[in-house]
Image (cartoon, rainbow, N blue to C red):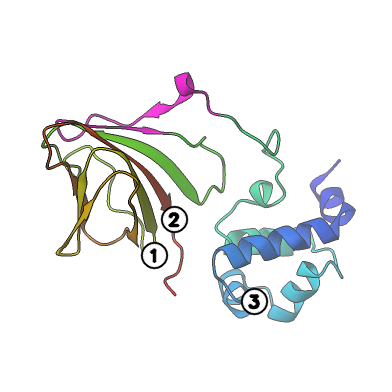
Amino acid sequence: MTVAEDLAAAPDALGARIRALREGMSFSLRDLAARSGVSAPMLSQVERGETSPTLQIATRIAHGLDLRLSQLLRLDEEGAVTVVRRSERRQGPDGTEGHRYEILTPPLPGQRAELSRHTLAARAVTGGPGDPPMHEPGSRETALVESGRVVLHCDDSRHELAVGDCVTFDADLPHHFENPADNPAVLLAVVSAGLRRS
């Protein structure tokens, strides 16, 4: 099946996917129209499945959603479910002494969030050379303390967190985690890339 045939085959499914992606990025129809160069009325018709977009229109919509056309159409995905086994986790580079992390999500195209597991040795901190860079504008991070205690330092404020505590913050602000205790601490973190602040 050609790409053009894919576009024409299931306009309802493609329209629903475009709407879900747009809403997931907190874009209005006008926002996506401005980003893609496709008029808001045309986007509305595509989302409702009333028309199949041309290859050129679909490419512009994909670009407005920060995707390649193949990602929008899911042509480069092998299936709807991807399992990352423990042995397949990607290890983060060596960073600050006492801070190790591994990425738990697969490297899928168009993925807007990443889950990582961080282990902080006693008295260790994140945020050193080799640690993940400052996140893109509009990113959000949610972290859950799995074991131990950590302190989040974010934008000149300090937040003490214990096992089971969860925190969400604007990840494009200066921040780092600290383990103030004599025992290791583990936290899970989800970074959602480029979401708009509401």
In the rendering, at what x and y percent does residue 181 appear?
A: 12, 38
Helix, strand or loop at disc 2? loop
In front: 38, or 93?
93
Position of the N terminus by quadrant: top right
Instruction: Give amino acid for label 3.
Output: Leu
Instruction: Give amino acid for label 1.
Output: Gly
Indicate which disc, 2 or 3, sits on the residue closer to the N terminus: 3
Mark 2 to mark 3: distance in Å?
Answer: 20 Å
Region rendered in magenta: 84-103
Residues at marks 2 and 1 touching, judged by CB atoms closer than 8 Å: yes
Position of the C terminus by quadrant: bottom left
Q: Is residue 98 magenta?
A: yes
In the rendering, at what x and y percent does residue 116 appear?
A: 39, 39
Please give the label number shown on residue 138.
Answer: 1
- Dot 1 alpha-carbon crowd within 10 angstroms: few under 14, some 14 to 19, many 20 or more: some
Indicate which disc, 2 or 1, sits on the residue closer to the N terminus: 1
In front: 178, or 29?
178
Residue 147, compared with residue 150, is above or below; it is above
Q: Residue at x 32, y 32 (%)?
A: 92
Helix, strand or loop at disc 3? helix
| Residue position for label 2 | 193
